[in-house]
Amino acid sequence: MSLVTDQPSRQRFELKEEGKLAYADYRREAKVLIIPHVEADPALRGRGTAGRLMTGMLEIVRSRGEKVRPLCGYAAAWIQRHPEYHDLVD
């Protein structure tokens, strides 16, 4: 199973699959995580990795009682397509 981890020292969430990395950068403003960029290694693109990253990241955010503000086009579009996470948008 894939596991999304928060890397506070790098200010990003990471997901490693098949030795490759997908990540979502963030910066914190109180209890809101600003998400300016999501990226997946080219070898992982088109395989659902970024979606799994988003799901894991948003579950962590929810468990902490935080919100997100997606500035990244991919993150904003992904959340728009997944109404179960609309409550997390600041």
Image: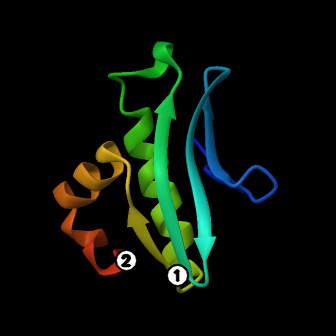
User: Is 51 rendered above or below residue 35?
Assistant: above
Amino acid type, label 1: Glu
* N-term-proximal mark, 1 vs 2: 1
Residue at 51% from the left image edge and 56% from the top image edge: 56
Amino acid type, label 2: Leu
The image position of residue 21, as x and y in percent, is: 62, 29
Left or right, 70 with reference to 24: left
Left or right, 74 with reference to 65: left
User: Is 85 rendered above or below residue 74?
Assistant: below
Q: What's the distance in space between the residues labelled 1 and 2, CA to CA?
A: 7 Å
Q: Residues within 10 Å of mark 1 (few under 14, many from 20)?
A: some
Where on the picture, by quarter, is residue 68?
A: bottom left
Q: Which secondary structure lies at badge 2?
A: helix
Residue linked to disc 1: 66
Quadrant the C terminus occupies: bottom left
Residue linked to disc 2: 88
Residue at 38% from the left image edge and 60% from the top image edge: 70
Q: Which mark is residue 8?
A: none
Q: Are marks 1 and 2 in contact (CB under 8 Å)?
A: yes
Residue toward you, 59 or 86: 86
Residue at 44% from the left image edge and 34% from the top image edge: 49
The image position of residue 44, as x and y in percent, is: 47, 21
